[in-house]
Amino acid sequence: MLVTFHVLGQVDSTIVCIPCNQIVEDQAFTQLKNTWNQRPIKIVHVGDSHIQIGHFAKQIRDLLGQNGTLRGSGITFPYSLAKSIDGPWVKSKASGVWVGDNLLSSKPKLDIGLTGFAVKTVDSTAFISFQLRDSAPRFNEIRVWYIADSLSFTPDLGSNFTLKEVVHSGGRMGIAHFVSKSTFSQFDLKLIRKDSIAREFQLHGVEFVNSKENLEYHALGVSGAQFIHLIQHTKLWQEQLKLLNPDLLIFSYGTNEAYNGNFDSKNFTKQVSKFFDAIREIVPNVAIVVTSPPDTRSRERIPPKQVEIVESLSQLKSSFYDLNKVMGGFGSFQTWFDQNYFLKDKLHLNKDGYQLQAKLFMLALLGQLKPQWDLGPIESFVSDRVKLLYRKAAVSDSAQKDTIVIRPQEKIIKKVKFHQVKKGDTFYSIAARYHVRVEALIEQNRRHKSKTLQIGDRIRIK
């Protein structure tokens, strides 16, 4: 039997859940729609290695830039000085003695902000050489994020730059704003000791600017990070947040929590909720979007806490984007891996994988915030890629582009399987236990769909 239809709209034929590709909005997100219509907005995206690697964030930046003018690079960092990998904008090399640290340390030697990294020197003759990568656009201004208190050396970028101003947070964090006299592809960040009190310099990032527009996107990720690391190990996040003053905060954590056998959902929800309350005291009108982690299989392990972390993130007082569900839910990893969207570690996607995930996310974000923007090219890209991500079921591709062939199968009598609900069971946890889709589980147990599961209920598995 030959059936023809538009594949993108068929949830049952493709593992990607297109109807699920939307952001569950809270009131702040709804209000943000009007803000963006009045002026460009500032977006700060904080997360783990999926953000630090850069492919996901670069796609978001590119898609924002296609319909608007971005102010610049957003905050970047000489990550190699903190024993990590330099980002997409610059390569860096240090002279002198520098000490680096990040928010993964249980007791950081340095005070860390939202950047997640910091480096420090007590040698006023030390400096950092920055080389812009060949793919970097032309910039005409540099903003240096640093500890700008009375004990700090003053940053200096050389004769090609003029210090325009230093903006303070009201605490220790500050931004030195430099304007270049001509185009540049490299520069040295040197230090000036203006008085005898100054004794150190602590860097929290550099930002390259090439526009007067206010549309900003900052991607701040730390490989291996969990939400709790950001909350517990960053003393200066409030000051940096105040200086950034974002309209939209996106948090993309959960992958590392999913593999943490000690993850406590109740304590997690309590701490993150308190953290969000503190954020709203600093930036009252900020919209917060939380994204769930993708389905992964690090070291061939099924993440034991994936169901719990997705549920916990969905219950926070914020907007929520269920990337895990959009990707196909629990067990969808294998299809993405078979289509070469993952690296061999099965924990991180490759460039193509992050590109597809970013475009799915931006279809939801921009489709709800900026529906007047032309999203046709993104939709076309996603449609072409999604058509290849079929579930391994009684459905297969035909030779025709927009058709699938449903092949008749022999009738097989299957024994009905049930699960008796125990304390703490949810549809998510039951689906994970039996490796079935949450949506399918709910659909065949409709009588329970609108109420909380009760101990002793019989849930049909298949």
Image (tube, grey):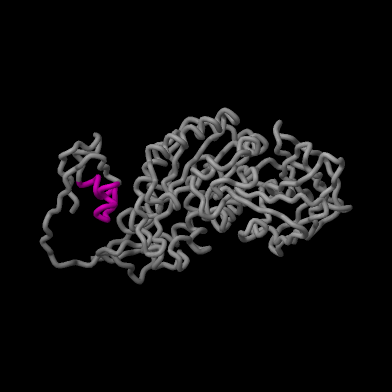
Q: Is residue 261 left or right of residue 114?
A: left
- Image quadrant occupied by the N terminus: bottom left
**Residue 93: quadrant of the picture:** bottom right
Q: Is residue 30 above or below residue 101?
A: above
Q: Nearer the viewer, residue 170 or 31?
A: 170
Q: Is residue 376 visible?
A: no
Which residue is pictured at 70% across the width and 33% down the height?
Answer: 171
Q: Work out which residue is located at the far bottom of the displayed protein and give it.
A: 399
Q: Nearer the viewer, residue 50 or 97?
A: 97
Q: Is residue 343 left or right of residue 304?
A: right
Residues shaded magenta: 429-444
Q: Is residue 8 visible?
A: yes
Which residue is pictured at 26% across the width and 52% down the height?
Answer: 433
- Image quadrant occupied by the C terminus: bottom left
Q: Is residue 427 left or right of residue 76?
A: left
Q: Position of residue 405 (x, y in %)?
A: 28, 66
Q: Is residue 99 magenta?
A: no
Q: Work out which residue is located at the far right of the displayed protein and give it.
A: 159
Which residue is pictured at 47% across the width and 42% down the height?
Answer: 290
Most common SS among magenta residues: helix
Q: Is residue 30 left or right of residue 11?
A: right
Q: Is residue 408 above or below residue 152?
A: below
Q: Is residue 433 magenta?
A: yes
Q: Position of residue 204 (x, y in %)?
A: 68, 47
Q: Position of residue 239 (x, y in %)?
A: 65, 36
Q: Nearer the viewer, residue 402 or 37?
A: 37
